[in-house]
Amino acid sequence: MALAVTLNAAVITLKVLVAMVLLAGAPLALNRRWRLFLAIPLSVFQGFVPWSRVAGVPIPLAYWGGLMLWPDLVVEFKRVVSWKPTAYLCAIALLYTVSLLWSPDPKLGLQPIGYFLQFLVIFAAVVIEGRRDPQTILRALAVTVAFGLIQAVAVVVFRVMPGLRYAYYLSSIARWFISPNVLDRLFTVGQNNVLDPAKSGGILVVDANDGSAYLGVLAFTALGLALHTRRRWLGIAGAIMLGAIAFSGSKIGLILAVVLPVLALHIISLHYRQWRNRLRMIMVAVAVAGALAWLAPKAIQLGQGSGYRALSAFLSKSDATLSVREKIWTYGLEAFRRHPLLGQGFGGWQQDFPHYAAKVGIDLGLPPHNTYIYLWSQGTLLATLCGIAFTVAVLRVGWRQVRDPRAQSIGLSLAMTMAFLWTFIHGMGNNSGLVGEVHMSPVLACLLALAYLQRDARA
């Protein structure tokens, strides 16, 4: 037994050393453009290779690609900590690190801290490369959108053919795109909503809500790029992604897929007055298309059922979902009263919540389903305040830019604003995090960096 523990520790140490060597040597061996490709377009597929486990946690190639850009964070560190949005993220990462000291399970903090670091690294790298060659960044985002179309098609196909979806999650192929740890628990203790025939998460995620949010972020990225580059295929890609969200089965995703595009079209009409009447017609078309897209999968599910029955089922499921979340948030309030300042630390929620869940009759393993509650639980009250400040700062930057007639690109500003707005709203009832889950985070970092470059250009 002692020998096995020693060997396991030796293997972990060896992997850490190899990772450090690779991270140190990658900036010398790979051009920044290649490392940006690994960090941004590859984030669509992640790439979980068998040998990438560290302490039992699979680390995807896309994450390593992001960390390979670390010298750029060193170069841009002064700017990163001096700009409010990224300064707040640095503060949260620091608070998370400090909270490891009183966390019941500190290893749970390594992943969220690591992904905050990846976001900041990609942000810094895009700022540097964007000053030198903005087209490199635009091409990287365009390739990401093209890859994302595969996810959009998969969401539709898996909704129509749930048997194919289950076969995919049980296959060895899925383990390259989804964390093997997640898949190992999916049909046992870690069941998720994609097992519901009325849900679909595509080939990349096992949560239909996260899948819809990812498509929303990519859709606005595509639409913003289309407006900026005048490339029609990007606009078509964005429309396809918004349409695919209806097949995910996510209620909040469906609502946002109609409301936010209408808001975006209104903002565009403020800049292009000559298009105002045409854009208003498109707003109406989006609303009608959203209603029709909602009815299509319902018709698949209900056969000859009436629209009234579909609406009733939709509202009934919405009430049930909100009821569960209200119980979760009630526990969060009770826990906050006990630990208002320091929170629970990493693992604290997982340790204490099951006792409450058993009493109220909900799943014992549910997380907070709210970004700001999770920030408090894991990283202290100050982390939550920084998270709120980050939200306000990002939306303020975005709003100023989309309203500014001097802005270099209304398209890129709109993409950043709408993508983050979707992420923030989604995070109020889910667990994607302040900067999105692992697929969304690199794209959001890239969009925020482009917003910084526009601000920088006017300074």
Image (tube, grey):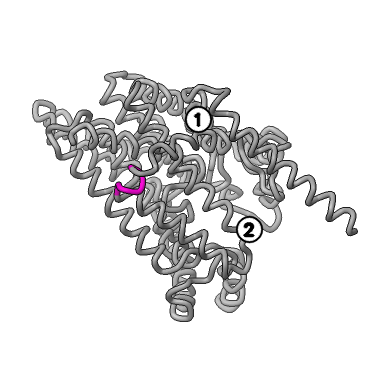
Cα–Cα span, label 2 and label 1: 36 Å
Residue 82 inside the magenta-drawn segment:
yes
The mark found on residue 376 in the picture is none
Counting from the top left corner in percent of width and height, residue 9 is at: 78, 51
The picture places residue 371, in percent across and down from the top left corner, at 43, 58
Count of numbered circles in the view: 2
Disc 2 residue crowd, few under 14, some 14–19, many 20+, Cα 10 Å: few
| Kind of residue at disc 1 | Val
- State the image quarter where residue 383 is shown: bottom left
Is residue 41 a member of the stretch shown in magenta? no
The residue depicted at 48 percent of the width and 46 percent of the height is 117
Q: Quadrant of residue 1?
A: bottom right
Query: Which residue is at 35% across, 51% downward?
Result: 87
Residue 122 visible in the snapshot: yes
Image quadrant holding the C terminus, namely top left
- Secondary structure category for the residue under label 1: helix
Magenta stretch, residue numbers:
79-83
Query: In front: 227, or 105?
Result: 105
- Whether 133 is drawn above or below 311: the answer is above
